[in-house]
Amino acid sequence: MKNKHSDFLKQNRKYFLKIVFGFAFCLFSFQAVNAQKQHPHISVKDSLDGAFDLSDYIIYAHGFIVVPTVITEPALGGIGGAIVPVFLKKHAPVVDENGKKRFINPDITGGIGMYTGNKSWMAGAFRSGTLIKSKILYRVMAGYGDMNISFYANNLPNQNDQEFKLNFRSTILYTQWLKQFNNPKWSAGPQYLFLNSKINLPDFNLPPPFVDPKDIKSTISQLGGAIQFDGRDNIFTPDKGIRLQSDFFWSDKILGSDYNAWRLNLSAIGYYPLTKKLIGGLRVEGEQAFGSPPFYLLPGINLRGIPAARYQGKTSIVTEAELRWDLYRRWSLMGYGGLASAFNDWDQAFAKPVVYSYGTGFRYLLARKFKLRMGVDVARGPEDWAYYIVFGSNWLR
């Protein structure tokens, strides 16, 4: 069955991509005509260089755009499609009571409907914005999904990793509220995650060794906090600056959760212009779980070229570097590579080979006034190739 499914995807991939991109073109053309009827001054050509640019379209069409997206995550079948209606609201900088200028990130409101090659689907909505007077950055996301995801038994003695395909039917709610300090680059505040899941197990000769009976139908309720420093020059495709974040989650029966566990996350992402046209980037992230979390919330490796949930453990460490070469006008070339490890005990941190990935890609400056680039990445992991449609940055946080 696996080979037949893989052959089907390979035979129909090009046809599927043509349908998705054809639909995207027709949908964008329809929106552009509508927007220009309502606002004749809207143009999809930039006033500075005359190149194709969506800045004015996004700003003057009430900040609304529908983005048909190709889903390329290997863990979800390697091919799929999503419709993402997005509202972007651009804010002008404000001057605080101390006389200093404060830049405000655009408000982002949207929804998502997706379906992939392995019959996974999801519907949801999200919003990221700023309460300007209160200096509060907030994020809210909710959704429901019926997802088919492969998990692996990574620690079988004297055996290769074994794949198990599981079906998840899950409801999720996540929110984060960060209060900015006097220096608005610093912020801190609470966050909360609710996740209710039912797992359907296909018929196995042996059940997955990592699945506990209470995982089959479970509720996660996690309360936590975060502290963040964000000095990037923009949130979509930065050219310079760093973003540092430390956050944690606490899960307990007191909160209505079926699990008693902690999770600590550390993240550092930085960009630096090596030359006028060469931008270097570095990402270092680590996650540590304590207690007894469910297998599907264990830290994993998030690298281009490696399927989600392929490598997991109570600890994960990820490092990745990239270069962006602004080659010609709005076009850029990408090169990147990373190393990572996931393990259960620190004394066995490198008992298995370190996981690697590398690849290349391109970007186009799609909306100059938002510094928003979009493009495609092709990556190679230890086992296979993968490709990704990138909106903004692969390190979008």
Image (cartoon, helix red, strand yellow):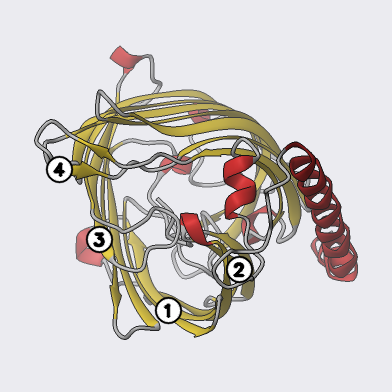
Camera-side residue of 304 and 28: 28
Instruction: Find disc 4 in the rendering and name its residue.
Output: 100
Residue 73 is situated, as x and y percent measured from the top left of the image, at 63, 58
Residue 18 is situated, as x and y percent measured from the top left of the image, at 87, 64
The quadrant of the picture occupied by the N terminus is bottom right
Q: Amino acid at mark 4?
A: Lys
Disc number lying in front (2 or 1):
2
Q: Earlier in the sequence, mark 2 or mark 3?
A: 3
Local packing at callout 3 (Cα closer than 10 Å; few below 14, some 14-19, many 20+) is some
Instruction: Find disc 1 in the rendering and name its residue.
Output: 337
* C-beta proximity under 8 Å, tags 4 and 2: no
- Disc 4 versus disc 2: distance between alpha carbons? 36 Å
- Disc 4 versus disc 3: distance between alpha carbons? 20 Å
Local packing at callout 2 (Cα closer than 10 Å; few below 14, some 14-19, many 20+) is many
In the figure, 237 relative to 218: above or below?
Answer: below
Local packing at callout 4 (Cα closer than 10 Å; few below 14, some 14-19, many 20+) is few
Instruction: Find disc 2 in the rendering and name its residue.
Output: 375
Q: Earlier in the sequence, mark 4 or mark 2?
A: 4
Instruction: Find disc 3 in the rendering and name its residue.
Output: 242
- Disc 4 versus disc 1: distance between alpha carbons? 39 Å
Q: Which mark is residue 197?
A: none
Residue 113 appearing in the image: yes
Position of residue 327 in the picture relative to residue 241 (left or right) = right
